[in-house]
Image (tube, grey):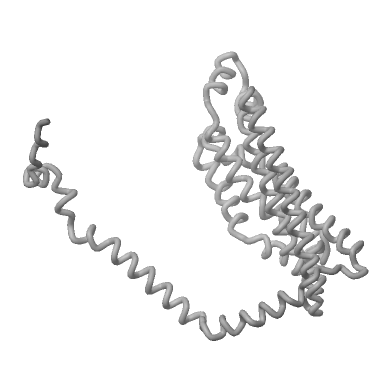
């Protein structure tokens, strides 16, 4: 066996000076960033009045509340809770559907391969960014003051909030579509609408459907939260039972929400896989 050739360290250092002789700024960048992050973290703890004593004292209170939740018991309010759960699911489904329907044509205007002009795309993208930058809970508070309390305000809040998110996601899916089909339709004499209808949409619709199904699952939780501020649904019942300290009913409502989210996740997962499988076969 031959002995391995000795490594000439000086020659390697001369060949790759950027690796061995990095400037001081590059060597200190990582420690400085870690130190700054640690300083911000400590400052946040102090500024927000974080207290380990209060935290550990609150654990005993949390344990007492957990014991009061056992066993879950709806009492005589089960029909009311089922109706409220149906309202929450309806808010999530209708709000997501409305957002997807209105976001699809707007996302075409925000896609680079559909509208090449940056001057035309810019206001559409900034509009989507502005809408998406406001949380669903804030939209719920706004719509409650506009149309009043109830599920209608919840539907509008989710629809407006998801409109911005869908517009961005759909436009990115459209921009990532294969242009060969579009070029083929253009070469055969098709118009711009034909390119969108037969070249782009068949490619992106399975992706869009998967995103919509995921948002329906996610918005079930969002509809519960906005229900607490007066947008109807099971969130309103949950807030009321917490206010009157009916912990057994609170635990039952939480179980209902968990079961509903799990069921929607199971169904939407099956539908997503079916859509992806159908697309792969096609």
Give the residue displayed 63% in from the left and 46% down from the top. 166
What is the residue that sits farthest to the front in this orientation?
1
Q: In the image, 75: left or right of 31?
A: right
Residue 145 visible, this angle = no
Which residue is at a point 9% across and 35% down the rendered structure image? Answer: 3
Q: Quadrant of the N terminus?
A: top left
Q: Nearer the viewer, residue 121 or 64?
A: 64
Is 202 in front, or is 30?
30
- Residue nearest the observer in this picture, 158 or 248: 248
Residue 11 picture quarter: top left
251 versus 101 height, above or below:
below
Above-or-below relation of 107 to 250: above
Quadrant into which the C terminus falls:
top right
Residue at 56% across / 23% down in the picture? Answer: 182
- Estimate the x, y position of residue 266 in percent, counting from the top left: 71, 45
Q: How many marks?
A: 0
Q: Residue furthest top?
A: 188
Residue 25 to residue 191: above or below: below
- Left or right: 129 as drawn, with respect to 137: left
Instruction: Where is residue 207? Give x, y as percent.
Output: 62, 36
Given residues 160 and 226, the one toward you in this image is 226
Q: Is residue 172 above or below residue 164?
A: above
Residue 230 image position (x, y, % from top left): 79, 68
- Answer yes or no: is residue 151 visible: yes
Residue drawn at x 73%, y 58% is 258
């Amino acid at each position: 066996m031959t002995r391995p050739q000795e490594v000439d360290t000086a020659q390697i250092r001369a060949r790759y000076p950027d690796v061995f002789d990095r400037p001081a700024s590059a060597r200190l960048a990582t420690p400085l960033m870690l130190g700054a992050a640690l300083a911000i973290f400590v400052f946040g703890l102090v500024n927000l009045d974080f207290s380990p004593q209060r935290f550990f004292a609150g654990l005993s209170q949390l344990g007492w509340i957990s014991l009061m939740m056992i066993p879950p018991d709806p009492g005589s309010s089960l029909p009311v809770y089922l109706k409220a759960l149906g309202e929450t699911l309806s808010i999530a489904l209708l709000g997501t559907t409305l957002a997807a329907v209105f976001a699809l044509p707007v996302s075409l205007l925000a896609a680079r391969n559909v509208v090449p002009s940056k001057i035309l795309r810019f206001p559409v993208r900034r509009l989507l960014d502005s809408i998406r930058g406001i949380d669903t809970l804030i939209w719920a508070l706004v719509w409650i003051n506009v149309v009043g309390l109830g599920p209608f305000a919840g539907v509008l809040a989710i629809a407006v909030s998801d409109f911005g998110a869908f517009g961005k996601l759909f436009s990115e899916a459209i921009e990532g579509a294969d242009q060969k089909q579009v070029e083929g339709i253009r070469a055969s004499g098709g118009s711009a609408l034909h390119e969108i209808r037969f070249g782009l949409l068949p490619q992106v619709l399975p992706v869009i459907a998967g995103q919509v199904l995921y948002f329906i699952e996610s918005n079930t939780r969002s509809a519960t939260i906005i229900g607490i501020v007066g947008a109807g649904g099971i969130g309103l019942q949950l807030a009321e039972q917490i206010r009157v300290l009916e912990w057994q009913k609170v635990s039952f409502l939480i179980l209902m929400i968990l079961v509903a989210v799990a069921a929607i996740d199971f169904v939407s997962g099956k539908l997503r896989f079916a859509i992806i499988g159908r697309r792969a076969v096609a």
